[in-house]
Amino acid sequence: MEYRLRTPLSREELSELRAGDMVYLSGEIYTARDAAHKRMMECLDRGEPLPFEIRDSAVYYVGPTPEPPGRAIGSAGPTTSGRMDAYSPRLLDLGQSVMIGKGMRSKDVVDAMVRNGAVYLAAMGGAGALMSACVKSAELICWEDLGCEAVRRLEVEDMPLTVAIDSLGGNIYESGPAAYLQSMKGGN
Amino acid sequence: MPGPFEYMRTVKAEDISAAVAELCIRANKQLPEDIVRAMNAAREGEPWPVAEASLGVLCRNIEAAGEMDLPVCQDTGMACVFVRLGQDVHIEGDFNAAVNEGVRRGYQQGYLRKSVVADPLRRVNTGDNTPAAITVELVPGDRLELTVVPKGFGSENMSRLAMLKPADGVEGVKRFVLDTVRAAGSNPCPPIVVGVGIGGTFDKAASLAKHALLRPIDCPNQDEFYARLEEDMLREINSLGIGPQGFGGRTTALGVNIETMPTHVAGLPVAVNISCHVTRRASMEL
């Protein structure tokens, strides 16, 4: 299935998505990766507010290249999501509903997704230039000292994403290779 | 009698900086021809529709990077700089400083990402992608050859090293490489390029694996035994089913390159350095 969706996404919209579906996502999303996640945990530990409203947010794990003159952003493909596994369950329990990245997630993350009706969308790893074209504007909102790891608010349009893990725990990283191997056994 | 420097050819530090800067930018925006050819061939030969579609997107991205003058991937890497230094070259100025100045300039002028932290545990970004990881090899002659390999860490993180026993033999090596690729799964942005270093010592095996990524993937190992092993391992990796992006399919790897060196009677070191489909390298001779 293919969906055209705009943030913020309701839990109803998210519940329809199944691993393997394509989503063309538009609207506001936030960037955060390793160092920003670590600082967000420190904020929570101190009882301070996070740099953006986490409830119903979509967070893109990306550290873009600097924007050349005339562009909103440089190359902007996803980074490996697994490095955020230690932080994600806490954020999901606080209401974050969409994670965007690439690669496998831990069982703890998948459990937290199912518990909260969240989804994990995969952007095309390595396709930094194409993803850049989907970003209409980028605004640095926090932790400039982190450089490429600073938190940015992005306005994206028709960002092509694959539902990697859905809100029921369906997982393309398991079902995709299994289906391919099964088809090979079929004598192709 | 000729003076001590009359046999030497002088290369200025500034020329090294200029060359490194240019190579950083070129390597990040334009993939080597062997990789582009392999990506297109993989797309044509891919039987699984989802995988074929993913490869199509990645091929388009390579073209888009050229058209938009952007890096192919946002992880513009840690700058690994390989130097083949002719022993009759005299360098006027500070060599290491010159290479780092080149990296600084290239990453600034090329709008490349600064991805290096000054300390592995205290983790403050250096802000200019220095220092480079410099490897110098002394060779005969009076030329200086520079190769810049911006190494992304999505794939670097999936690399592994094992000190196998001699009794493990070729089957043990194959098993370790396959286990490493299987464990990496979708994380290193498959299709990957697999650099394998066999032999030497603990550190040399890792270095061989990295050097293996410098060789174009359409140039097999010159030793027929290892050329066949490269072929066998590529076939076995592409039977794992991981596929592009880990969504399933044939094309898990584009190539396997093996480099070897003599080792100790008691040991069989094996290192696997994984690189994504954005396997970058650019060279220049001074």
Image (cartoon, coloured by chain):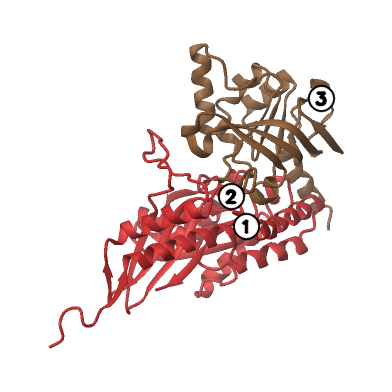
Looking at the picture, tell me which residue is in the foreground, A4 or A175.
A4
The residue labelled by disc 2 is A68
Task: Answer above or below: position of A47 versus B155.
Answer: above
The brown-tinted chain is A
Q: Secondary structure at mark 3?
A: helix
Q: CA distance from mark 2 to mark 1?
A: 9 Å
Residue beneath the point at 60% across and 51% down? B73
Q: Secondary structure at mark 1?
A: loop
Q: Secondary structure at mark 2?
A: loop
The dot on residue B69 is 1
Using the image, name the chain to which the residue with label 1 belongs: B
Query: Can residue B270 be seen in this snapshot?
Result: no
Place of residue A116 in the rendered image (x, y in percent of width and height, measured from the top left):
72, 19
The answer to whether the residues at label 2 and label 1 have Cβ atoms under 8 Å apart is yes
- Name the amino acid type tagged 3: Ser
In this rendering, do the residues under marks 2 and 3 share a single chain? yes
Place of residue B179 in the rendered image (x, y in percent of width and height, measured from the top left):
57, 48
Quarter of the N terminus of chain B within the rendering: bottom left
The residue labelled by disc 3 is A15
